[in-house]
Amino acid sequence: MDFDKLMQWMEFAKKYQTNDFWNGVFDQTAFNEFMKENMDMNVQDSHQAPHQAPHQAPQPPRSNFPPIDIYVTPHEIIIIADLPGYLKENLHVSVSGSRLLLKGSPHPLITGQPVVQERPSGDFNRIIELPEPTDAHHLRAKFENGLLILSYHRQFFQEERIHIE
């Protein structure tokens, strides 16, 4: 959709919208407050080169690192996070219901100024919505060959009929 058509659509929609709806749609204040409350906004973007030009504004942390896969089998949920260059001692995993928190700091492999830096590095903080809730004591974690593998058994509840008075 080109910009002129978008503007026409917005003008048309304003005729039917009576309050301050459009200002709220484009207002990022509430989103930024939510992010400050739930994530450390001072963490350097793990995909941003450390030798960023001084005229560029710092980027907020990306919420899609580390990349993950989630599998649901008949008996368990499996989460795989891709974390090459990280050590298990520098990782933090916690769970609350259906929210999984992954935090980590990399282990520096080489000291020196990078000329090209395409591989992800840096501190990260990611909240993942799980398909089914679990407790920390049910969650198993294994870190091997740069992969963090988390799993937990699915909890099946037998359907119970409720008596209606």
Image (tube, rainbow, N blue to C red):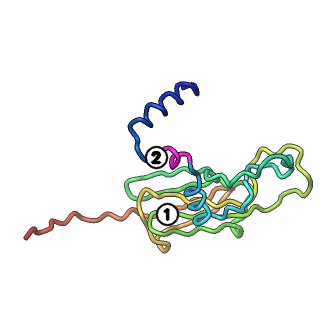
Q: Which mark is residue 21?
A: 2
Per the rendering, the mark at residue 17 is none
In the current view of this chain or complex, which residue is farthest to the left?
165
- Residue at point 55%, 57% (across, down): 30
Placement of 13 over or under 58, stated as above or below: above
Q: Earlier in the sequence, mark 1 or mark 2?
A: 2
Q: Position of residue 128 (x, y in %)?
A: 53, 58
- Tell me if residue 150 comes above or below residue 57 in the rendering: below
Residue 104 location (% of width, % of height): 68, 64
Distance from Cα at disc 1 to Cα at disc 2? 31 Å
Amino acid under label 1?
Arg
* Secondary structure, magenta segment, majority class: helix
Q: Secondary structure at mark 2?
A: helix
Tell me the crowding category of disc 2: few under 14, some 14 to 19, or many 20 or more residues within 10 angstroms, Cα based: few
**9 and 154: which one is in front?**
9
Q: Which residues are magenta?
A: 21-26
Classify residue 128 as left or right of residue 87.
Answer: left
Quadrant including the N terminus: top right
Of the pair 4 and 152, the residue shown nearer to us:
4
Give amino acid for label 2.
Phe
Q: What secondary structure is found at the residue carrying circle 1?
A: strand
